[in-house]
Amino acid sequence: MGIAIDIADDWHASLAALAWHVEAGVDEVTGDGPVNRYDLSVELPRRTAVLPGAEVARQSGVQDPRVELGSSVDAVAAAKALAAQAQTLDELRAVMEGFDLCELKRGARNLVFADGNPAARVLVLGEAPGAEEDREGRPFVGRAGQLLDRMFAAIGLSRTSPDPATALYITNVLPWRPPGNRDPEPAEIAMMRPFVERHIALASPVVIVAMGNTPLDALTGQRGILRARGTWMEVLGKPLLPMAHPAYLLRNPAAKREAWADLLALQKRLRG
Ligand code: URA
């Protein structure tokens, strides 16, 4: 079935309209007039973004604060300049809210910045928000997050604890949900890495736990979480413990035994 629909200006309204039509059995979408997609003579407008903190960006080597979207080199330089500007976690959240160079932001409902106690000794770094996190604006609130909470509770750590010794601080490499929960792309990880590094510097945890391949990659440049898990590393002057992602543990319950060993290793390190 095919019908013509008006696409609203608002992204979420458009998505809701499309979802409704798909549910109603529509499998073809047409416009009012025919479009010749082979006609390359029409030049599309180039999209540019005006960065907040343009002066800082300029001083830090970004020549022109209007950075072309799609240019990952400029986006990384801009992210570095902006991240360096933030002197507190609130400022970091603000500069990330204003960062328009990551395409993921356009499809996300909320920036998912962090949750838990920023004074915690343990910082948990995840991959990216899923649908529930995107809706709530908090990391790890879906099924994987519930497992994460149970895992850390088993060694006496909680995101709701006011005591830094028993608290958790939780954030992600990407603050915006990738469409359809696809894996983050290398360019997206590279673009957001300066914010992650600044986040860690400002929160200043005693230990970092990298949950899954994306945070392992963002912090160490290596992948292969199932090989790396349980092996202590050092990044940004801090001990790093890679662990399997709780979503992986939900799909592979047999791997929970190794995750438990990793949690005990973390507990031992914190006691020592
Ligand atoms: N998975 C993650 O890595 N992070 C979240 O916030 C949710 C699921």
Image (cartoon, grey):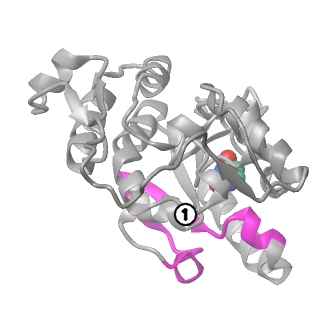
Residue situated in front as seen by the camera: 108 or 172? 108
From the top left corner, tell me how far across and down residue 209 is, in percent: 58, 56
Left or right: residue 150 versus residue 93 is right
Q: Is mark 1 within 8 Å of ligand 1?
A: no
174, above or below 108, in the image: below
Vertical position of residue 134 compared to residue 259: above or below: above
The residue shown at (12%, 27%) is: 64
Quarter holding the C terminus is bottom right
Residue at horizontal 89 percent and vertical 51 percent from the top: 23
Q: Where does residue 224 sit, x and y in percent of width and height? A: 50, 79
Q: Is residue 237 above or below residue 108?
A: below
**Towards the viewer: 215 or 270:** 215
- In the image, 232 versus 189, the foreground residue is 189
The structure residue drawn at horizontal position 58% and vertical position 51%, both measured from the top left corner, is: 178
Residue 167, can we see it? no
Report whether 152 appears left or right of 210: right
Measuring 59% from the left and 59% from the top, which residue is drawn there?
A: 269
Residue 234, horizontal then vertical, whole percent: 39, 61
Residue that mark 1 sits on: 241
Is any atom of residue 11 visible in this view? yes
* Segment colored magenta: 224-250
Residue 192 sits inside the magenta stretch = no
Q: Residue furthest front?
A: 33
The residue type indicated by label 1 comes to Leu
**Magenta segment includes 245:** yes
Q: Quadrant of the N terminus?
A: bottom right
Badge 1: few (under 14), some or many (20 or more) residues near its Cα, within 10 Å?
A: many
- Residue ranking furthest to the right: 24
Q: Nearer the viewer, residue 123 or 137?
A: 137
Residue 239 drawn at (x, y percent): 46, 57
